[in-house]
Amino acid sequence: MAEKVGVYVCHCGSNIAGKVDVEDVAKWAGENVKDVAVSRDYKFMCSSLGQKLVEDDIKEHGLTRVVVAACSPHLHEKTFRRACSNAGLNPYLMEMTNIREHCSWVHKDRAAATEKARALVSASIERVKFQEPLEPMFVDVNRATLVIGGGIAGLQATLELADAGYPVYLVERQPSIGGHMAQFDKTFPTLDCSACILTPKMSEVGQHENVTLLTYAELEEVSGSVGSFKVKIRQKARHVVFDDCTGCGICVEKCPRKVLDTEFEAGMGNRKAIYMPFPQAVPRVPVIDTESCIWFERQKCRACEKLCPTNAIDFDQQDELIDIEVGNIIMATGWEPFDTRKIPQYGYGRLANVYTSLEFERLCNAAGPTNGKIVLRDGKTEPKSVAIVHCVGSRDERHNPYCSGVCCMAALKLGHLVVEKTDAEVYSFYIDMRTNQKNYEEFYQRLLGEGMRFVRGKVAEVTDAARKPSEQGKLIVQCEDTLVGRQQRYPVDMVILMGAIEPQRDAREMGLKCGISCSMDGWYTERHPKLDPVATMTDGIFVAGTCQGPKDIPASVAQGAAAAARVSGMITKGKVMIEPIVAKIDEEGCSGCRICNNMCPYNAIEYDAEAQVSRVITALCKGCGTCVSACPAGVISGAHFSDRQIFAQIQGALWDAWQPQDAASQDAETVPVSAP
Amino acid sequence: MSEQKFEPKIVGFLCNWCSYRAADLAGSARIQHAPNVRIIRVMCSGRVDPSFVLKALAMGADGVMIAGCHPGECHYLEQNYKAMRRFGMLQHTLRGLGVEEKRVQLVWASAAEGQRLAEAIDQLVADVRELGPLHWAGNWEENGERLQALEDIVHEHQEAMEVTA
Amino acid sequence: MKYAYYPGCSLEAGSAAYDKSVRAVLDQLGVELDELNDWNCCGATEYFSQNELVATSVIARNLALVDSEHDQLVAPCAACFLNLKKTDKLLAEHPAMKCQVDAALAAGGLSYKPGRVHVRHLLDILYTDVGPEAIKAKVVQPLSGLRVAPYYGCQIVRPLNGFDNPEYPMKLDEMFEWLGAEVVDYPVKAHCCGGHMTQISEPEAFELIRRLLQSADEYKADVILCMCPMCQLNLDAYQGRVNGHFGTSFKLPIVFFTQLLGVALGIDMKKLGFGKELVSAEPVIRSKLDGSSVGAGT
């Protein structure tokens, strides 16, 4: 029996109709393409009225197939599948034709765009006739969640879920949770103490009955899919037995080896070879840095071991692999600072009193190496003038084209701290001042009032080459003041470089482990930039905080909470639908050649030695279809992407190539169709 | 049909995860490109059976694009490598059939590379435009046996290329 | 290794020491230079602003003269290097101009396809193609004890030449570290020497020269290394007048980097063109390198 196809061509206001003659496409399909029972165009197909149109036609005309030519299926496939379902038609008998993103939005010529739209619609019609009813599959959602990254975004997500009563595994690669926020002195624009608002959250996470905290640990491997991920975590050897340690700190105190702390203190202070990154660290269990420990260097010392009251030191401890099972994963892996050495003309690393913003955060932190005193590298001289350089590695096509978003406000905050703590003159060199969140502009205005000087221009260089006696012994900031229109030189004692916020160096690699992608800049790609900012293209994997793009603390917290809410919803529902797009082997025709076995990266095809046939393990199959196209006997079929469907789609897409433009559709059948 | 200007007809097989989304992104960003490629979505470039390409050429396409995620970034871990291997074999077959190499191109475009995909489409269209029409469809009508010969070749090569890794 | 060689006018006149030392050094390192037959002036910095088409055609002639045996052209002079490189790029990117230049070349029986010749600076050849291993292996007189200030000037590293950081180049610094010299990392090494400003406004030019000399002096350099005839001329020949103008007493020898590289390779100083500079370099080099052996080699 011939199918009855309904075709619906969407105007999308003027989005599609502006470049494609949608009335023509609908009319043409109705009159010329075989098996089309109804063909309509409509202003907004995705509106409730548009959906109702489809539903009514299915009921009234007994449509057996539906084609909706509108936007990308990634946007509205679900919408129209639901509409079909509502009218009693199996949702997999609907096919979407993308004539917006792939057509009207990218072509200027109306005739050419209309011609392409016809071809795409024709392709969908031919394809949909061969589509088969499918039943979605459901899997149970494991109630546990893995949060990767213990910065503020990850902490927020962890607490939201744990407080809701769900188990959470929080994995952090550093010895303590807290992230970059723990390094900051004050937060803008309120100037409240960073540690004061962060550490309560840290200890709450540390003590929460629903949280399993895995610090000094790395994500090793992820397998499975939404609802039931299997994850391997590498617990790096701390060389301190976690359960035996009381966190008394004697080992740290007695350790004779001091090293430069390039992580928490950003190179501004020291730590011991056995250490906790900072006093409020969670957990309060130190780690031994094997690269600087005297025992690991020359088998001497063991002072920590001798003095530990609970015998918790274990020099032989090895990395341990921990297997966990979770239903969802939240990536909150954060950022790392731009290497300011990449802009050598700013002198970082060469000129002593050029600082990175993170170094300066430690310098003015009351718990930092100078107890919060702002002094030059000599450790005693207070600067009389400080220059703050914005956009170091941001908005710079040689490094990062994007705006790091938070540096303007951070620069204002640092400037304020200098003004508050010293008598120094502060100059801020900016391109554009970006203060676009609540109370940010007000903060800027306040600093203008405090006497901070603002110079609009991109700094050319920071140099110690004096041209005048007044410049001797100073760092000279050379910059074109674009508001004055003149090259200026500003001799100062200290320069702070506001380095860009960059993705973690291994962000791409980590993303691959979880099956999510990065933008060109290296930020994780969200499912939709506006309407779905914490989900990703991979079901069950969410992103939160700066790993998705530069953002400030409030935005990171909001995203952490949002991701947790999404996960909560999935756990509450208990089950998650999976597309029934899987491969199936017709055992009758299988010769047992086993070629397909090696095609599958998920080991979803097993060989039955007794029956001498291969079989697809449906639960493991992800539906890529590689085995389908590899089977020499052609007996593997891929649901919803069968050879027959794709051949028909090719034929439809080329309708104007193999039949004269004015010919009636009946001729179609005379063309060879090489379906297997 | 008037013979005024040759407009190539090209079929594009784009993987669901990277290149199809790259085309979506090109749309959202309004990156204009040639309207000659008619896109067919497959779940993975690994799904592209060489016979799809031959079918498209046989049905009158002047060129074919196969697009997938970048090597190492496949949504299905490594299936685009299989697409890459098949592509080599396919090119071999096409050479044997006298089809110019540039008519069938393999392109990598991540979901973030709308610009890249648009450029690749323009490039392919320009290449095929330079080569002129393929006219395979016309040839079949003249000689029906060729279709059988063509399909035999596909199956032979399929067997040859799927050697165990 | 074999390259087409474009010496440029300066290297035949005021900067003969550069040409002499380039040839001696490359010979010692086993690099073959084939001088272009019948090359002409590159037009220096001025011609482009006079008449772009003529300037481009004049330079394109030199590119067209590179025979099919060579695909790489070396120019030691900064202005020549930049002009040749720029012209190749202009011709590739501006088809209309290429048409006109093609016609001009055709009149002389020549033709040039943009991109055929890869224009390279001498430093790039030495740093990249010859490389640290080969150079270090040939050092017979390490430069230890000698404080050298590498001076890059503007045209070799800017605009993006691809082989060094345009804002803060380091390749010449690194090369002299291979030779054992104490390299002075002074901040103005890519600042302008004033170029032809000496002919336009002496006070402006002198100020620019003074800044360079002063910074190198503050960093206690014994000698400044140049890669450009113009830079060498300004810093060396005007040093006395700069001293007079500002009441300073700089006495910094200014040499081409190939001259000192030659010393390290044990080449006779006479063969390296020493003695042509106004602030004599030989005494400093001999005293610092503590050896009657200096320059006694081949």
Image (cartoon, rainbow, N blue to C red):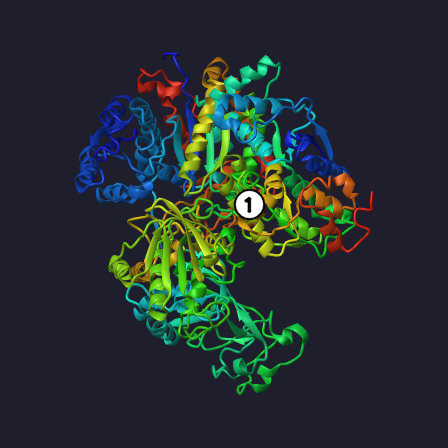
Q: Amino acid at mark 1?
A: Ile
Which chain hosts label 1?
A: C
Residue A610 visible in the displayed image: no
Residue A277 visible in the displayed image: yes
Q: Nearer the viewer, residue A275 or A399?
A: A399
- Judging by the rendered image, the residue that carries numbered circle 1 is C209
**Image quadrant where one finds the C terminus of chain C:** top right
**Image quadrant where one finds the N terminus of chain C:** top right
Q: Nearer the viewer, residue A69 or A674?
A: A69
Q: Residue at x 44, y 77 (%)?
A: A279
Q: Is residue A660 above or below residue A575?
A: above
* Residue A39 sits in quarter: top left
Q: Nearer the viewer, residue B56 or C30?
A: C30
Per the image, label 1 sits on a secondary structure element best described as helix
Q: Is residue B12 above or below residue A335?
A: above
Residue C22: image x %, image y %?
71, 37
* Residue B156 sits in quarter: top right
Residue A346: image x %, image y %?
48, 54
